[in-house]
Amino acid sequence: MHVVATAGHVDHGKSTLVRALTGTDPDRLAEERRRGLSIALGYAWTTLPGAQQPIAFVDVPGHERFVSTMLAGVGPVPAALLVLAADDPWMPQAEEHLRALDALGVRHAVVAITRSDRADPAPMIAEARSRLAGTGLAAAPVLSVSSLTGAGISALQAALGALTSALPSPDPAAAVRLWVDRRFSMAGAGTVVTGTLPAGRIRAGDRLQIGAAGSTSVRVRSLQSLGEDVGSATGTARVALRLGTQPAGKLDRGVALVTPGAWWPTTVFDV
């Protein structure tokens, strides 16, 4: 499968566009639907016309208060769908999200100008190309769409298909590093964590270390991908791991589950 994260300012139509592409509302929480505002990471997937593999979307919140949530969703993802609105100027979180994508090394993206039924998208298309110049996403295609009328959706699907077909193939033999982006408990199942697996393979029965410097490991009792039980998953993939009962605080969002002994922690890095 391929995994693509959304990015962009609050209320520019990221979740609505994901729903138009997949038929699934990525806003899971009742409060999100009541307020029309994404708060947590959302998930949806589809297989585009003519595609061989499904695309899983990680839908991130656009509000400035939820930047840490956005980073948790985008961090391990190889490609992005940057969403801007035709009837708004370039906004602060659009800039912040673009800078985050660039800093995280995301080099594959499509830019969608939403609400093109409300305003001429040409000014924002020009603005987007100007803002992307000088970043690692300068070559990203920019398209106008309307989630309400469906205009431009077919062209966007084609652009996403071209984007994902050009992504480098991850190494299935690579050491596992799965950043947890959601943790919850289920009756009878214990602790479940989800994340984007960028490379490597996770199998039911594997033991994974909590953090590169950690001394605690967990056993993967079972796993799912795209809502289906699977015996193993190979990156790039969205996965949910059932780990049984785990101590509170050990597996919060942002913690990495890694192949034991394969990674080394550091407090020094080049910027």
Image (cartoon, rainbow, N blue to C red):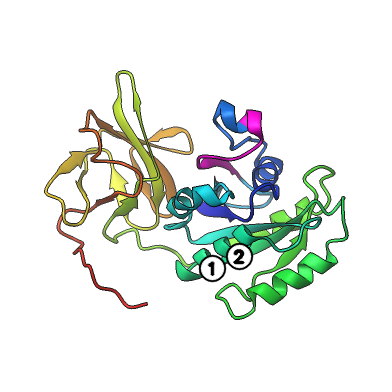
Residue at 28% across, 55% down: 176
Q: Is residue 17 left or right of residue 239?
A: right
- Asked if residue 268 is positioned above or below residue 20 in the image, the reply reads below
- Asked if residue 57 is positioned above or below residue 102 in the image, the reply reads above
Q: Which residue is mark 1?
A: 99
Query: Residue 220: percent from the left, percent from the top?
Result: 25, 38
Q: Is residue 169 left or right of residue 8?
A: left
- Asked if residue 187 is positioned above or below residue 167 in the image, the reply reads above
Q: Nearer the viewer, residue 104 or 263?
A: 104
Label 2 close to label 1 by CB (< 8 Å)? yes
Q: Nearer the viewer, residue 62 or 21?
A: 62
| Real-space CA distance between mark 2 and mark 1, rounded to the nearest whole angstrom | 6 Å
Q: Which residue is mark 2?
A: 95
Query: Residue 157: percent from the left, percent from the top?
Result: 70, 54
- Dividing the picture into quadrants, the one containing residue 159 is bottom right
Q: How many marks?
A: 2
Magenta residues, start to end: 33-46
**Quarter of the image with the C terminus in it:** bottom left
- Disc 2, SS: helix
Q: Nearer the viewer, residue 136 or 44?
A: 136
